[in-house]
Amino acid sequence: MSEPPAGTTLVLGLGNPILGDDGVGWRVVEEIEAVLGASTPASPGACDPGPDRVEVDRLSLGGLRLMERLIGYERAILVDAIATGEAPPGTVRCLRLDDLPDRGRDRLASAHDSSLGAALVLGRALGAQLPVAPWIVAVEADLDVEVTDQLSPAVAGAVPRAAAEVLRLLGLETAGMGKGSADGA
């Protein structure tokens, strides 16, 4: 993969599209692509909405692999499901990595990979150019593992609001998209 052009923002939908609500990040970036007209045969997933270039992608991995995907980008917006139990499913929140609950942020998240926080620390220590403070657009979900490509009604209803939040972070608010507050259901 070549180095992205200077000023490029990566919008990355995270999760697994065949595990129900865990696939919400992918659905949100599909909305972003539709709004931006991002996918073209000449440059899949990339568009130029203005002075800054936006690249849209999807990823089903975290930790070190996610950190590797962020290398070279000045800004990143990650879109993912979150299960805090503190809000009803479908609630959309805009967070920084430090806002997330500390679940092994500075150590391994499992025996096979690290948390994103630990991976970013490692990447920077090794000299990787990484976004300073990626934004996370999180959709509250009930992440009971169910093999399906369908989102629950509450989470599906949050997709336009989450997409509108991503567009707001990009400075590209779109009239009529995602009516209602970002933190409401």
Image (cartoon, rainbow, N blue to C red):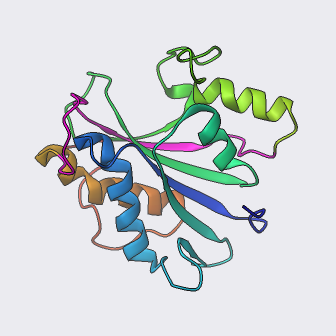
Q: Quarter holding the C terminus?
A: top left
Viewer-nearest residue: 169 or 5:
5
The residue lying at 71 percent from left, 46 percent from top is: 131
In-image side of 58 versus 42 (left or right): left
Picture coordinates of residue 119 (x, y %)? Answer: 68, 29
Task: Establish if 38 lies above or below 20.
Answer: below
Q: Quarter holding the N terminus?
A: bottom right
The residue lying at 60 percent from left, 68 percent from top is: 54
Picture coordinates of residue 49 (x, y %)? Answer: 57, 78
- Residue 148, image quadrant: top left
Viewer-nearest residue: 140 or 109:
109
In-image side of 99 versus 2 (left or right): left
Quick check: can you spot residue 182?
no
Task: Establish if 50 lies above or below 131.
Answer: below
Residue 124 is a magenta residue: no
Residue 130 is a magenta residue: yes
Viewer-nearest residue: 139 or 151:
151
Picture coordinates of residue 80 (x, y %)? Answer: 40, 42
Considering every residue shown, the one lying at the far right of the view is 127
Picture coordinates of residue 30 (x, y %)? Answer: 37, 65
The residue lying at 41 percent from left, 67 percent from top is: 32
- State the predominant SS element of the stretch in magenta: loop
The residue lying at 54 percent from left, 65 percent from top is: 171
- Residue 91, image quadrant: top left
Q: Which residues are magenta?
A: 129-151
